[in-house]
Image: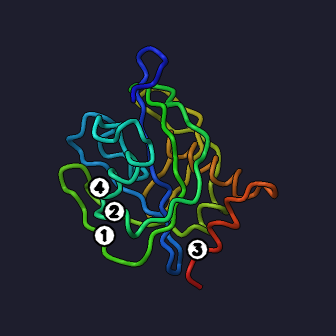
Amino acid sequence: MESKRLGRRTAAVVFAILAARPHGVIFTERAAHLRDHPGQIALPGGSVDPADGGDLRRTALRELREEVGIAAERVTILGELPMVQQRRANNFDVTPFVATVAPGPLTIDGSETAAVFTIPLAVIIEELTHGTVAVGEVSVETYLLDYESRRVWGLTGQILRKFIEAWNDPVNPLRAAVEATLIA
């Protein structure tokens, strides 16, 4: 399913929260040889594939399995955040899904993923800021989070902001859904 807007590509990612304490959110460092965003920090996800049958949830779950080895049986999708448009370069329209992940191993696919790590959910909620990042000779305004020598920014920073907005919205059911699935 390609985006209807000319020249835009459709993708899905998973804001995957580990159900077990400390309830870390899974991030990947993209492999250096990838065409799109090499070496950047991202949420697991990617472009729609014809095998997904136009279902963005299937895209998100397939990519989660491919990139970090999490089978769909371990995943509970709890909601969908508003689509985020990439502002530069690759013209992606990205739909983020919020999910919790049951305990189990993570397996890195070295062809797509250089590293996998987690950031505690509380850190994301409390420490996301707004600032600028130098991209070549251009300064880009973005949401950003620095954690253990890694910087999350750009499209992923926008998704974190959308999650925090939903989390803090008293009429949005997302927070209650997430909290109900976390292991104390």
Alpha-carbon span between mark 4 and mark 2: 9 Å
**Residue 23 rendering spot, x and y as whole percentages:** 53, 74
Callout 1, which amino acid? Leu
The residue sitting at the bottom extreme is 184
Please report the residue visible at 43 percent of the width from the left and 52 percent of the height from the top: 43
Alpha-carbon span between mark 1 and mark 4: 9 Å
Q: Which numbered disc covers residue 181?
A: 3
**Secondary structure of the residue carrying numbered label 1:** loop
Of label 1 and label 2, which has the lower sequence position? 1
Q: How crowded is mark 2: few (under 14 residues within 10 Å), some or many (20 or more)?
A: many
* Residue identifier under label 4: 67
Callout 2, which amino acid? Val
* Residue identifier under label 1: 106
Q: Do the residues labelled 4 and 2 touch (CB within 8 Å)?
A: yes
Callout 3, which amino acid? Thr
* Residue identifier under label 2: 116
Along the line of sight, which residue is nearer the eye, 74 or 143? 74
Q: In the rendered view, does 184 fall on the left or right side of 152? A: right
Please report the residue visible at 25 percent of the width from the left and 55 percent of the height from the top: 114
Q: Are marks 1 and 2 in contact (CB under 8 Å)?
A: yes
The residue sitting at the right extreme is 170
Q: In this view, does 84 lie above or below 157?
A: above
